[in-house]
Image (cartoon, helix red, strand yellow):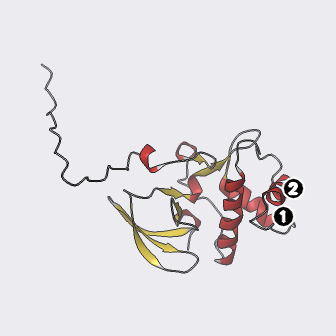
Amino acid sequence: MEYNKLVAVTGLGGLFELISSKADGGLVRSLEDKSTKFVSNRVHTFSHIESIEVYTTGDNVNLSEVFLAMKNSSEALPDAGNVSDIKNYFGKVFPTMDFERVYGSDMKKMIKWFEIISKNNIDIKLSESAGEENQEPIAEKKTVASTAQAAPKAVKNAPAKKVNAPRKMA
């Protein structure tokens, strides 16, 4: 399994391997229980792990850099339930992290994701095609309503809206 195939799915805990994708969703396999399922774009949003950035006091860094710092650290992983222990841990392992913009819940996610990646023996490295322009900060919260992929749910007995055809300019 490769690091560049890992995705996080909104509304579903843990990490997933993206097996295949379609226009209306994707087929994913859980790294925790190895179950496979189809996940719809209408309900969920996919975030490739290699495209996530973390806020620091300087330039933002890719999540893989934080994972590598965690891997190379001699510090023991803290309990994911204690936010103050997690902040102290990241203060020692990655001291340039901007603790005012990276939420405690995001740090918990990083701990859990790192445990999953380590348990599955996945090599943490970016693919050559992972560019800076495709990266998004981890602290940025996305909602289904804010994504271009979200579609309104059908309402029973709702009248159909008339759509005007675009006009041609002369």
- 152 or 139, nearer to the observer: 152
For disc 1, the neighbor class at 10 Å (few under 14, some 14 to 19, many from 20) is few
**Tag 1, which secondary structure?**
loop
Contact check, label 2 and label 1, Cβ < 8 Å: yes
Residue drawn 85% across and 69% down?
76
In the image, 123: left or right of 38?
right
- 166 or 82, nearer to the observer: 82
In the image, 95: left or right of 167?
right
**Residue 63: numbered disc:** none
- 19 or 157, nearer to the observer: 157
Residue drawn 70% across and 71% down?
115
Would you name the residue on which mark 1 appears? 73
In the displayed structure, would residue 18 be above or below residue 32? above
**Percent from the top left, x then y, of residue 102?**
70, 47
Instruction: Kindly identify the amino acid type of the residue bearing the numbered disc 2.
Output: Lys
Q: Earlier in the sequence, mark 2 or mark 1?
A: 1
Quarter holding residue 162: top left
Residue drawn 51% across and 61% down?
11
**Percent from the top left, x then y, of residue 89?**
83, 59
In the image, 92: left or right of 137?
right
Instruction: Kindly identify the amino acid type of the residue bearing the numbered disc 1.
Output: Ser
Residue drawn 83% across and 60% down?
85
**Percent from the top left, x then y, of residue 98?**
76, 43
Quarter holding residue 128: bottom right
Callout in the foreground (2, 1): 2
**Tag 2, which secondary structure?**
helix
Cα distance, mark 2 to mark 1? 9 Å
**Percent from the top left, x then y, of residue 21?**
38, 64
For disc 2, the neighbor class at 10 Å (few under 14, some 14 to 19, many from 20) is few
Quadrant of the rendering where the N terminus is positioned: bottom right
Single out the residue that lies furthest toward the top.
170
Would you name the residue on which mark 2 appears? 92
